Image: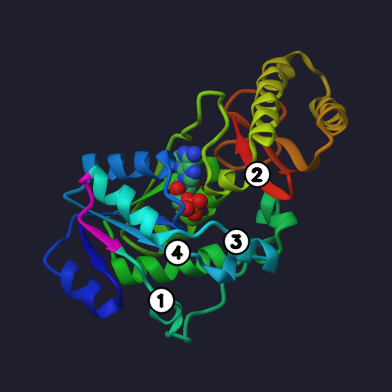
Amino acid sequence: MKILLNNTSLLESLRPFNDIGFVPTMGGIHKGHLSLINKSNKLCKKTIVSIFVNPKQFNNKKDLKSYPRNIKKDLKILRKIKKIDFVYLPKFNDIYKNKNKPKIKLPKKDKILCAKFRKGHFEGVLDVMNRLTKIVNPKKIFMGEKDFQQLYLVKKLLERKYETKVIPCKTIRNKKNVALSSRNSLLNKSNLNIAANIYKNLEKIKKNINNEKNISRFLKSKKKELINNFKIKIDYLELRDDKSLKISRTNKNSRLFIAYYLNNVRLIDNL
Ligand code: AMP
């Protein structure tokens, strides 16, 4: 596993290869990330993982400050799995020194779900993914369905601009079905139990949706119930089409999306 600390060493190391699988991360490596790495290993000759906490996608300074960072621990985990060819640890300037990049804007129809509640977040994500793709020039990029809207927006942008393919990977969960996330390290046991309970409720809600005539009214009342029962703040609870992300009137080809706060930590999930 070769560690690449800047763009010069990255360009030199990757030059001989043209079948590169890329797994971009912000660190806090967990089994969700490892599943992306496994898929890349299966589908590509070489795998590169990046760890970069991108300040431009944080719409909240406190969130950026408290975001879990532990490069030493991450490298230890990555070394152990013995399947990674390169780890890219860029500095801010490696990514952002090119100031000529056009500012990325989200069209109005995409300002839904997290885009509505985290102003500027996806503009930051798309900008960094555009820059990383240009630098790494991968054949395939592996991204998790846990961040479904991110996957949807990044895939749409990158596959239009580059030859690269964005490959969706299933959400990995713990034993109690809580989606793995680097942010889970900011939760205590009781928070994680609540998250597991919320997941159970979401499963029930999803199952019952088809019996409902007015889905939006049903979800509104379920959202209130969740808020009251678990004393949580919920940004959204919405059923959306899994291809267009438009509001859905049926369970078919649809996902139930939620964003909520536990212990001031914002969690997202979809099922
Ligand atoms: P992050 O480090 O949180 O920015 O995530 C890096 C990549 O890992 C993104 O493509 C995420 O969607 C993906 N990812 C994060 N958590 C999970 C999970 N529980 N299951 C599958 N993929 C995940």
The residue carrying mark 4 is 129
Q: How far apart are labels 2 and 4 at the CA level?
A: 22 Å
The residue nearer to you, when weighing 42 against 226, is 226
Q: In the rendering, which numbered label is found on residue 33?
A: none
Comparing labels 1 and 3, the label whose residue is closer to the camera: 1
Magenta span: chief secondary structure: loop
Q: Which residue is mark 2?
A: 267
Q: Position of residue 174 (x, y in %)?
A: 50, 29
In the rendered image, the quadrant that contains the N terminus is: bottom left
Closer to the N terminus: mark 2 or mark 1?
1
Q: Which residue is mark 3?
A: 122
The amino acid beneath tag 3 is: Phe
- Horizontally, residue 62 falls left or right of residue 219, namely left
Confirm or reject: label 4 Cβ below 8 Å from ligand 1: no
Q: Residues within 10 Å of mark 3 (few under 14, many from 20)?
A: many
Residues rendered magenta in the picture? 82-87
Q: Compare marks 4 and 3 and give the one earlier in the sequence.
A: 3
